[in-house]
Image (cartoon, rainbow, N blue to C red):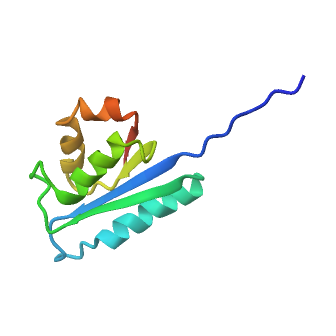
């Protein structure tokens, strides 16, 4: 008897942030790396969220807030975050522990 294998495509949301465009920081480079990661692993990109010129120390950021709203709407099943020299994004997600499991998403930090 042949087994049926259900293949479910992972729909990923990408999040990039830079506090300034000085010092060679470009959010487009972060997103390009995340897109390449998803492409190499067969992930479908559901949406991209960006915050430019907003400190990672701020809990509320327009792009991050939109990502969290869409997570609750289950518009994707995984989130890839671009992290650079500090863990601001990791801290932002850790400060919202109730939001993450209820959204049913997997969070991945790059």
Where 8 sits versus 43, above or below? above
Q: Position of residue 42 (x, y in %)?
A: 60, 53
Residue 100 in the image: state x and y as whole percent.
30, 34
Q: Residue at x 24, y 53 (%)?
A: 64
Q: Position of residue 10 (x, y in %)?
A: 54, 45
Q: Quadrant of residue 31?
A: bottom left
65 over 106 or under it: above or below:
below
How many marks overall? 0
Residue depicted at 24% across the width and 43% down the height: 90
Q: Nearer the viewer, residue 102 or 43?
A: 102
Q: Is residue 41 visible?
A: yes
- Relative placement, left or right, of 30 versus 84 is right
Left or right: 18 with respect to 7? Answer: left
- In this rendered view, identify the residue nearer to me: 69 or 27: 69
Q: Quadrant of the N terminus?
A: top right
- Residue 55 rendering spot, x and y as whole percentages: 11, 59
């Amino acid at each position: 008897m042949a087994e049926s294998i259900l293949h479910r495509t992972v729909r990923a949301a990408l999040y990039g942030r830079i506090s300034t465009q000085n010092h060679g920081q470009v959010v487009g480079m972060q997103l390009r790396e995340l897109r390449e990661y998803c492409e190499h692993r067969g992930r479908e990109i559901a949406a991209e969220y960006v915050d430019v010129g907003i400190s990672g120390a701020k809990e509320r950021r327009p792009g991050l807030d939109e990502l969290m709203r869409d997570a609750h709407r289950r518009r994707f099943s995984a989130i890839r975050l671009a992290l650079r020299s500090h863990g601001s994004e990791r801290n932002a997600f850790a400060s919202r522990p109730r939001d993450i499991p209820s959204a049913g998403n997997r969070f991945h930090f790059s």
